[in-house]
Image: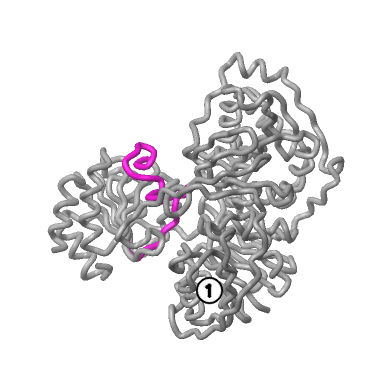
Amino acid sequence: MSVLVLADHDNGQLGGATLNTVTAASQIGGDIHVLVAGDTSGNVAKAAAAIFGVTKVLVANGDSLGHGIAENVAPLIQKMASDYSHLLAPATTTGKNIMPRVAALLDVMQVSDIVQIIDANTFQRPIYAGNALATVTSDEAIKIVTVRSTAFEAAAEDGGAASIEEAAVGSDAGLSNYVKSELSSSERPELTSAPIVISGGRGMQDGSNFAMLEKVADKLGAAVGASRAAVDAGFVPNDYQVGQTGKVVAPDLYVAVGISGAIQHLAGMKDSKVIVAINKDDEAPIFQVADFGLVADLFEAVPEFEKELS
Amino acid sequence: MKVLVPIKRVIDYNVKVRVKADNSGVELANVKMAMNPFDEIAVEQALRLKESGGADEVVVVSIGPTQNQETIRTGLAMGADRGIHIEASQDIEPLAVAKLLKEVVARENPGLVFVGKQAIDDDCNQTGQMLAALLGWAQGTFVSGIEVGDDHAIVVREVDGGLEHLEISMPAVVTVDLRLNEPRYASLPNIMKAKKKPLDSITVDELGVDVSPRLTVVKVEEPEARSAGIKVADVSELVNKLKNEAKVI
């Protein structure tokens, strides 16, 4: 048995979700190889080779791979697939875009967004936005799996000494071209891997009020998130959204501010270790999942919270 | 140009799903069903494209039992021109759905396929990408903005770090995300009109696709419930608990 992990990266740095996916691979057993497909400087491959448990890193470096275009990356993985029993990718937007394309090219039914590995063929995954958990077995010769990174610990970033080999790049399918990105730049940790997340909802009333949360976040080393209501109201960009249709987070501490706690939102954060809710409505459903609830006006409580942290 | 929109019938998103006592699945008997919300957004986008002169026909297709015809009628009431029902009694996995849709595409020859990025029942997020692969077409996934040209489209994708703009050549498969549009409600006259719109039925066998499942569902269970904790009186008690009890800050 050997497992190929598709690395998540932005050409400059290895994405944290790759580490969690390597942990999932180690639970399956066998050799772990990591594929770095992109237009990278070499740092990503070095970081991948250092991950504890990885035995080989395959690097496919080329212009056509620079933006993770699925039509170009999928055939590359398809060609390597016969060497592996499992192909894994983190369930990031990149992994979710590419892996089903690989699966169809190989005539394999994919298992999406797993949260637990029972054995090499059997996986647990949430369905109905996490309102039920399904255990599924795959009899496919090659298992194609995407991994929910918050459900697995990160593998150690050092201790590995994998060999680095070049892999064939393949040709540009000529179907899609990258135009541009509008990425949010932030000094704060990434939402899905942050140890602490503080999120605001409709109760924040205005985008500018998120500055209050940012101050708290900077004191705690936290990431800032939002509910769908806050994103739809235009308070913050879409990549802040925590929930069924946004990002799934499971930090050590999740602070929900002015969030009522719609099922949609709970699906994205209910696996957090400790949940704090600050809301003036003491009937808000968020209090049913919160470890510590504070019924208060957030415009008084949040600045006070920030002060107490000093 | 024709736009094909595959639509799935799922448990209505407002319904709280219950796991069956024998852990074989979730309770579907006497549960309100509806069109997958992401597919509604796909129908809406196809209709807007037609209304702006960018398409001349919108065809909706659904795979499942006879009741799926209701879902197709919903799409027709929103404004789609024609429906195709692929009769199937069992649950069909995304790979087989993609193979069936590939056959429909061969018959219908659409310039674009708009489909929801995922269904809210199995949450697989696979069908659109798989269909694009089987057709050898470009794919634009998780799309929250689109501009359709003659032989290409510019799509805005919702990605983890923000937004990404791609130029995809057509024909293409586009999987739509939540913020692309707000789907319309069907008016009563349009619901009446929809009853007279053409709806063809074909069987899985007629399309010559093997739809036997590749995965086996061993069991379905309820996730562990999270119990409510305590209410704190004020901010200083909260900070105290987080520091000394939970030890998370």
Q: Nearer the viewer, residue A75 or A207?
A: A75
Q: Nearer the viewer, residue B13 or A69?
A: A69
Q: Quadrant of residue B244?
A: bottom left
Q: Nearer the viewer, residue A248 or B99?
A: B99
Q: Nearer the viewer, residue A191 or B147?
A: B147
Q: Which residue is mark 1?
A: A22
Q: Amino acid at mark 1?
A: Val
Badge count: 1
Q: Quadrant of the C terminus of chain A?
A: bottom left
Note whether A77 is above or below B126 in the view shown: below
Whole-percent x, y for residue B213 in the image: 75, 55
Q: Main secondary structure of the magenta part?
A: loop
Q: Quadrant of residue B218?
A: bottom right
Q: Quadrant of the N terminus of chain A?
A: bottom right
Report the coloring of the rendering: one colour
Element under disc 1: helix
Left or right for A164, reference B113: left
Few, some or many C-alpha atoms within 10 Å of disc 1 (few <14, some 14-19, many ≥20)?
Answer: many
Whole-percent x, y for residue A303 in the image: 15, 52
Whole-percent x, y for residue B165 in the image: 50, 45
Whole-percent x, y for residue A149 in the image: 48, 65
Query: Magenta part of the protein: which range?
Result: A229-253
Left or right for A64, reference B91: left
Residue A236 part of the magenta-drawn span: yes
Instruction: Say which residue appears at 61% left-offset and 75% top-offset.
Output: A166
Identify the subunit bearing mark 1. Answer: A
Task: Tell me if I can see residue B90 in this picture.
Answer: yes
Left or right for A297, reference B175: left
Instruction: Say which residue appears at 72% left-offset and 20% top-offset.
Output: B197
Task: Tell me if I can see residue B91 in this picture.
Answer: no
Residue A159 part of the magenta-drawn span: no
